[in-house]
Amino acid sequence: VTHAPRLSEIGEFGFLERLRSLRIPRRDVELGIGDDCAVVRAGRRRLLLTTDALVENVHFRWAWDTPAGLGERSFAVNASDIAAMGGTPRFALLSIVAPRSARVDRLEGMIRGFAAAARKSGCALVGGNLSAGPQWMISVTLVGEPFGIPLRRSGARAGDHLYVSGLLGAAGLSREILLGRRRGSPRQTLAFRRPRARLDVGEMLARTRVASAVIDLSDGLLSDLGHVCRASRVGARIDAERLPFAPPLSRLAKEERLALALGGGEDYELLFTVPPVRARRLEEAARRRSLVVTDIGRMTRERGIRLAGARPRSTGFVGGFDHFRR
Ligand SMILES: [Mg+2]
């Protein structure tokens, strides 16, 4: 009897590996499965395609936020994948599963919040679908347009500088408060509830062409950096002393700070690599636009991710989030 593997055994990313053989060579598909977005050609234009679902009691609870706030978040976490490719979201589809007993005001408020957030980013909600099911699910599909050549995960080289935008760890801390694992006020949970897609940083990287690889921070820095390393066939060294911790983490012990910044996830900042010869140009471009970017390490020939400047026991993190492995 052969054993049919379960998703919990191979994990989300293990499963994605199995789909690589599904890649169909077509001239109008520039980039298929395996990056933050697919890149396709429609006529002379390149389009970015991405989709993601938020499931009740897995990704959100109604008690955590207003319906409009949840709609805003649903847009932002998807727009983040467009940001990571150096593009801007243009069109959105919303596919919703709701129980038959669902409150209409929740459904409508969520959709209105989504549409308003989309509009602010120049994106139009153009359609969707509503189905009945045992629990809520909000599935978002976005079509975006790249500012230049789309930014991939696969171009990092040994010696490249490793950068992150913004500050790290606040979303992970917020989620722990929402889950009741730490004490805190509703205001202290905003970082999780209202992430901001870094469309500004993605646009800068696309226009200046300084980055060799880009990914957004959704699963956690170690996990997302792991994707860049695998796609680019390199390793990385993170300098713990350089990590830009969000202010709410300052009252925590160093180990906790590191765990949240490296493994907490949901920060939706961009992680990117820049060849040494372009590092000054990046920093000047960021300064001109008042964007915060921090050099947190280097890409290495040696595979794997090393954490420098932290005690050995704080390097043993299980990094990031996989939907099926626990
Ligand atoms: Mg992503």
Image (tube, helix red, strand yellow):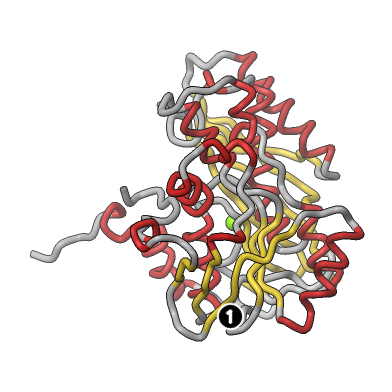
Would you say residue 17 is visible in this rendering? yes
| Ligand 1 found in image quarter | bottom right
- Indicate the quadrant where residue 228 lies: bottom right
Is 139 above or below relative to 3?
Answer: above
Q: Is mark 1 within 8 Å of ligand 1?
A: no
Q: Which residue is drawn at the image coordinates 71% and 70% (left, top)? A: 151
Residue 203 x/y as whole percent: 82, 60
Tell me: residue 254, above or below residue 99: below
Rendered location of residue 182, percent (x, y): 44, 27
Q: Residue at x 70, y 68 (%)?
A: 40
In terms of image quadrants, where is residue 180? top left
Q: Quadrant of residue 316?
A: bottom left
**Which residue is disc 1 drawn over?**
25
Q: Position of residue 89 (x, y in %)?
A: 77, 51
Q: Is residue 201 above or below residue 267?
A: below
Residue 177 in the figure: left or right of residue 318: right
Of 129 and 280, which appears nearest the observer?
A: 280
* Residue sitting at x 50%, y 81%: 233
Give the image location of residue 85, x and y in percent.
71, 63
- Label 1: state its secondary structure: loop
State the count of labels. Answer: 1
Asked whether residue 133 is in view, the answer is: no
Q: What residue lies at 26% left-to-right and 57% top-to-bottom? A: 9
Q: Amino acid at mark 1?
A: Pro
- The residue lying toward the viewer, choosing from 16 and 261, is 261
Residue pushed farthest right? Answer: 288
Determine whether, in the image, residue 305 is placed left or right of residue 71: left
Q: Which quadrant, please, contains the N terminus?
A: bottom left
Dot 1 surroundings within 10 Å: few (below 14), some, or many (20 or more)? few
